[in-house]
Image: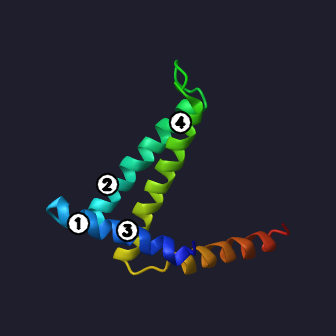
Amino acid sequence: MEFSETLDMYRNIVRRFAKIEGKPWGVEGGMMELSKQVGELSKCVMLQENYYCFPAENPEENLIKIGNELADVFGQIIRIADYYNIDLLEAHIAAREDEDNYLKGKGV
């Protein structure tokens, strides 16, 4: 699947959820959901890495949850980028080029 198709897939899901949620999500809703999803991702990672006094019940299932939470975080990033009309692919490339130039300037 192409990156643009991935974005369109998520946007379609957002449109469908909007039909049943009762009110539109602005950027504030996207930010709150992003924070929630990052928290859920953090919990899964902490379980996987044994930061709690109890281990993940099933490490393989927990890895699936980590993937799901990463995808949820990505979804909210798409939502926020769309709100501000930011092309994520262009922004990603520009940010990596800036980092590359910085590192070259440091001789790395």
Which label number is shown at residue 32? 2
Q: Amino acid at mark 3?
A: Arg
Q: Amino acid at mark 4?
A: Asn
Asked if the residues shown at circle 3 and circle 4 are in contact, with their CB atoms under 8 angstroms apart, the answer is: no
Does 47 appear above or below 101? above
Front: mark 1 or 2: 1
Give the quadrant of residue 19.
bottom left
Left of 93 or right of it: where is 86?
left
Residue found at x 40% / y 49%: 37
Front: mark 2 or 4: 4
Q: Nearer the viewer, residue 77 or 5?
A: 5
Question: Which residue is labeled 1 in the image?
Answer: 18
Report the Cα–Cα distance between label 2 and label 3. 12 Å
Left of 30 or right of it: where is 49?
right
Mark 1 or 3 closer to N-term?
1
Q: Amino acid at mark 1?
A: Ala
Q: Position of residue 94 (x, y in %)?
A: 61, 79
Residue furthest left as drawn: 22
Mark 1 or 2 closer to N-term?
1
Front: mark 3 or 4: 4
Question: Which residue is labeled 4 in the image?
Answer: 62
Report the Cα–Cα distance between label 4 and label 1. 29 Å
Q: Nearer the viewer, residue 84 or 40?
A: 40
Which label number is shown at residue 79? 3
Give the quadrant of residue 78.
bottom left
Asked if the residues shown at circle 4 and circle 1 are in contact, with their CB atoms under 8 angstroms apart, the answer is: no
Label 4 packing within 10 angstroms: few (<14), some (14-19), many (20+): some
Q: Position of residue 40 (x, y in %)?
A: 42, 42
Residue found at x 35% / y 71%: 12
Asked if the residues shown at circle 2 and circle 4 are in contact, with their CB atoms under 8 angstroms apart, the answer is: no
